[in-house]
Image: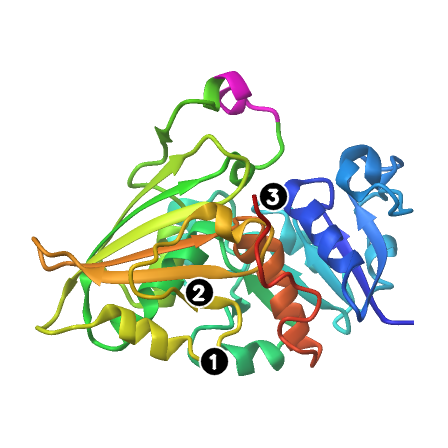
Amino acid sequence: MGIRVAVAGASGYAGGELLRLIAGHPEFDLVAATAQRSAGRPVSSVHPQLTGLDLVFEATEPTALGAADLVFLALPHGESAAVAGTLPPSVKIVDLGADHRLTDPAAWRRYYPGEHAGAWTYGLPELPGQRAAIAAADRVAATGCYAAATILALAPLIAAGAAAPADVVVVAASGTSGAGREAKPHLLGSEVMGDLTPYKVGTHQHVPEIKQATGATGLSFTPVLAPMPRGILATVTATPTGAATDPRAILGAAYADSPLVHVLPEGAWPHTAATLGSAACHLQATVDADSGRLIVVSALDNLGKGAAGQAVQCANLMLGLPETAGLPVYGVAP
C-alpha cells in the first residue's frame, strides 16, 4: 500500500492531469477523485485519456477525501478554503487554487471576490528557501500558471540586483485550457482558432502573486489567449540597474540545481511545443540591443509546471520523496 492520495475537483483539466500523474506515480495510490456535477460517473467518461483507470467520481465530501494521506484541491478560486477546513490536520493538502497564495488581504480583495482565507506556504520550489519550507509544510498553495512562467523568468534577476523592480513588463500567451473546462462562448473552437485575443489587460489576478514572489513593485501584465489547447509563452522585460549585466548567466546560476527548470543553450529560444506534457520550464535571456532592457522568455505547459506538475512536485517534497518522482521531465513531440 502506497501513499493514499485524493483529488477534489478532478473533472477539470488540471484535475485530469493530476489523475494522470498520480496514476503513474511510483509511490501514490489514487483512492478518490471527487467532482460535484460528475459524481457517480466513471472518470474515463469525462477524461477519455484515462480509459483503463477504474475509478468513479464521488461527491466532494469529507468522507471521500479524509481517508487520504494527501489531498490535491483542484477547485475554482474561492472554494478551496471551505473544503480544506473539513479535513483532519493530519491530511496534507496542496491547493491548486488561489485561495491561500497571497499574504496581503488587501491584494486579495482587489483581485478576487469573497474573504481572504489566509496564506499557506507558497508552492514554487525553485525560489530561494522554498524547497525546505515546502518539505516542512502540511498546507501548500501551488502557483498560478502565468505566475509560474513569469516568476521563474524574473525572480533571479531582481534578487541579483540586475533588474529594476519598478519597471517590469510581461506579455504572456496561454492555451485555452488555462481558462478551465466550463463552456464559454469565447472559448469555442470557431472563436479561438486563427485568433489571438488579449484579456484582463492590466487587471489580471496573477499580478499580486507575481509581485509578492519576485519583489517587483511595478508590473504591467498583458495575457493573451492563444489558439492552442495548452502551453504558456511569456516574454518578460525589465530595466537593468547597471551595465554589463548577463541575464542568462544569472538564470543559469539560480537554477543550476533545479531539475525542472532548463536555461537553454545560447541562441536557442523556448517554444511551447517543447514543454508539452512535461513538468519543466524552459528559459532564455538576452539584452535588447536597442533599448538595453533585459529580456527573458519562458515556456511551460500550463497544466504541467503551471498546475498539476507543480502540485505533484510540491507533494513529493512534503512527503520526503525525490522532487521529480512521477513527473515527466521531458516534453512530447511532435
Q: CA distance from mark 3 to mark 2?
A: 19 Å
Q: Nearer the viewer, residue 43 or 268?
A: 268
Does residue 136 show up magenta in the picture? no
Look at the numbered discs 3 and 2 and tell me whether their residues touch, using CB distance below 8 Å.
no
> How crowded is the residue under tag 2: few (<14 C-alpha within 10 Å), some, or many (20+)?
some
As helix, strand or loop, the secondary structure at mark 2 comes to: loop
Q: Compared to 75, does 241 lie above or below? A: below
In the rendered structure, the answer to whether residue 34 lies left or right of residue 318 reads right
At which x and y percent is residue 222?
A: 31, 41
Q: Is residue 106 visible?
A: no
Residue for badge 1: 257
Q: CA distance from mark 3 to mark 1?
A: 33 Å
Residue for badge 2: 103
Q: Nearer the viewer, residue 266 or 6?
A: 266
Residue 224, quarter of picture? top left
Where are the magenta residues, as a range? 183-190
Q: CA distance from mark 1 to mark 2?
A: 28 Å
Q: Nearer the viewer, residue 282 or 131?
A: 282
Residue for badge 3: 76
Q: Residue type at mark 2?
A: Thr
Look at the numbered discs 3 and 1 and tell me whether their residues touch, using CB distance below 8 Å.
no
> How crowded is the residue under tag 1: few (<14 C-alpha within 10 Å), some, or many (20+)?
few
**Image quadrant occupied by the N terminus:** bottom right
- The residue under the point 48% across, 42% down is 113
- The residue under the point 50% across, 59% down is 143
Upstream in sequence: badge 3 or badge 1: 3
In this rendering, the label closer to the viewer, 1 or 2 = 1
Q: Main secondary structure of the magenta part?
A: helix
